[in-house]
Image: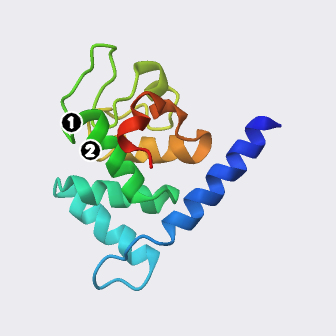
Amino acid sequence: MRRLVAAVAVSAVLASTASAEARLPGCNSKVCELRVAAKACKRSEPVACFTRASLLHRVPRSLLLRIARCESTMRWWVVSSAGAMGPMQFMPGTWRSTPYRSHSPFSFKWSPIAAAWLIRTDGVHHWNPSRHCWGR
């Protein structure tokens, strides 16, 4: 029951902040935004990859970016002393639990998408050790 209440609270916060995010220039719909972000992500523009993840899983881009800046300072090659990997600092077991496990956790394309999925389905507690840096 406590987990359900926490999930509802997280969903309410995510929904309210996701709608406040700015739209991409020249786009009037989420489909357009997703298409533009996907193309920019293919061109190796990291922030566009976070936008794409945000749109796919309805998690605020600003939250994903704050976590990545705190966890890895937006460097894809980082491996922590604990074994966390990539821009979102996934532990190997956590990465394997995502539907994106067949891709690399070091990828700016897949790491933010997996993080957005994880936040949407399970909350932000996976990044609690660095919450002092990214939390507000």
- Up/down of 81 relative to 101, above or below: above
107 lies left or right of 29? left
> Which residue position holds label 2?
108
**Above or below, 97 relative to 48:** above
**57 over 123 or under it: above or below:** below
Residue 81: name its quadrant.
Answer: top left
Q: Residue at x 27, y 32 (%)?
A: 86
Q: CA distance from mark 2 to mark 1?
A: 7 Å
Q: Amino acid at mark 2?
A: Phe
For the N terminus, give its image quadrant.
top right
With respect to residue 113, does 38 lie above or below? Answer: below
Q: Nearer the viewer, residue 119 or 6?
A: 6
Q: Nearer the viewer, residue 117 or 82?
A: 82
User: Mark 1 sits on what residue?
Assistant: 76
Q: Residues within 10 Å of mark 2 (few under 14, many from 20)?
A: many
Residue 40: percent from the left, percent from the top? 22, 63
Query: x, y percentage for residue 72?
Result: 25, 34
- Label 2 with label 1: CB-CB less than 8 Å: yes
What residue do we see at 31% from left, 62% from top? 38
Residue 129, x across and y down, in percent: 43, 27
| Secondary structure found at label 1 | loop
Of helix, strand and loop, which one carries label 2? Answer: loop
